[in-house]
Amino acid sequence: MKIRIASKEIIHFIGIGGIGMSGLAQIMHNMGFQIQGSDLLENKNIDKLRSLGIKVFIGHSKKNIKNISLAVISSAIKIKNEEYIFCKKYKIPTFKRSHMLANIISLKKNIIVTGSHGKTTTTSLISHVLVQAGLDPTVINGGVINSIKNNAKLGKGDWSVVEADESDGSFLHLPVTYSVVTNIDYEHLDYYKNFENLKKSFKLFFDKTPSFGKSFVCIDDLNIQNILKQKVKNYFTYGKNPKSDFQITNIRKKINSSVFDVRVKAFKKKYSIKNININLLGEHNIKNATAALAISLNLGIKEKTIKNALKKFMGIQRRFTHIFSYQKKDFYDDYAHHPTEIKSVLESVKAVHKKRKIISVFQPHRYSRVKSLKEEFSKSFLDSDEVVLCPVYAAGEKIDKKFNLVNFGQKISKNSKKQVVIVNDKAELLKYFIRNLIDDEIVVCMGAGSISSWLREIARDLKI
């Protein structure tokens, strides 16, 4: 679907405050397009857009879009949205974000990163290596990269690095040169209806790889292994598995970093790259870094440049981000909102902080996700010493009055064998911290909703 637009036409983003929408809006603004948008609430993404001179309306209204030429709509926007209805009524061309993104990057050579978990970190790592190598890529990411203090960057180079959203199938719209698939998990089944449909979608994604490109896939993931058996071509594998083309070996876990080696078997000459150092914890991040290494080697970037870039990587916001310390206690913020992500974060912390008490603060995200993965969530906190459970963040879903938070907490307590404390809001969470944290605890706040802002507000309340 080719979109023809002129730089002077007004392009309106419905739901511009989302991380993906705001990133695309920034890129198009920097390309010279006249961009504006609307969203329901203020947030940091909107603050960034306004600082660039992009007009943002708070609240959706047909008054916002009387003079627009084209609209871009977020996947989070419902069909009853007033602006969307106005566009349909007056036949204003309206495109999904993925279609617009596909057109914007169509003239680039693209590295598309997808998967159920780890795609934001992997996108960030690849982007950082390419920047350090002087390739000046265009970047559109699902999280703020600390080194550029943004989730989007318009580069002058030939390459773009894009995080692709698999949640609604839109990742299939993007043009691929190289791609990364980190893993495939039971996620977004509200859209796919069942796990088989999700796997079929990823098979279609693999099949998009052109003859001159390559897919890089984590062979440690059993679901990826099963798909590779279905006549998938033109790929390299990475992971701990001895059959990997880029095999991770000799992992050393430190308090603030990870060190590992990679045995390269993808080229005619087999060799090892030793002492790769990243300022990230956990085997999941070692795998993400290996994906970045593999792609960078295939681009012809020198080994020394790649290792230096990975060592200097400053991380991304909301991925085990240290927010503050208070009386020897450390408070971290993490985006983990799926059982696999929660387990990975806690395993990483436990592996290097064996003697410190770990407190998990968990805000479930979406009733549909919690209900479909209730058993998996309840077993996710084995490496925590205590769990503080917050109310479900609905994220646009209707409040499910039949959902019982106490019963959910009891299930976590039974299956993770941990004490569970329920708090109803930020004020109660602050009281819990003041009354119950008495030593040098590590507090890990997890969720994709408002828990991140709660933690930062609590830091202000404590006058940190």
Image: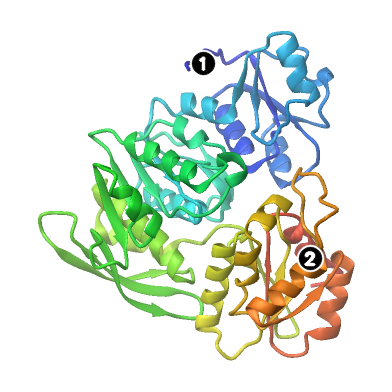
Establish if 291 lies above or below 5: below
- Position of residue 396 in the picture relative to residue 156 (left or right): right
Q: Nearer the viewer, residue 211 or 162?
A: 211
Per the image, the residue denoted by label 2 is: 390
**Location of residue 440 in the rendering, given as x and y in whole percent from the top left corner:** 69, 87
Q: Quadrant of residue 60?
A: top right
Q: Are dots 2 and 1 in contact, CB under 8 Å?
A: no
Q: Nearer the viewer, residue 355 or 410?
A: 410
| Disc 2 from disc 1: Cα separation | 44 Å
Q: Element at badge 1?
A: loop
Image point 50% across, 52% down: which residue? 116
Establish if 318 lies above or below 46: below
**Location of residue 249 in the rendering, given as x and y in whole percent from the top left corner:** 29, 73
The crowding category of the residue bearing disc 1, from other C-alpha atoms within 10 Å (few below 14, some 14 to 19, many at least 20), is few
Q: Amino acid at mark 1?
A: Ile
Q: Nearer the viewer, residue 285 or 184?
A: 184
Per the image, the residue denoted by label 1 is: 3
Q: Nearer the viewer, residue 240 or 102?
A: 240
**Location of residue 18 in the rendering, given as x and y in whole percent from the top left corner:** 67, 40
Q: Nearer the viewer, mark 2 or mark 1?
A: 2
Q: Is residue 389 visible?
A: no
How many numbered marks, from 0 up? 2
Q: Amino acid at mark 2?
A: Cys
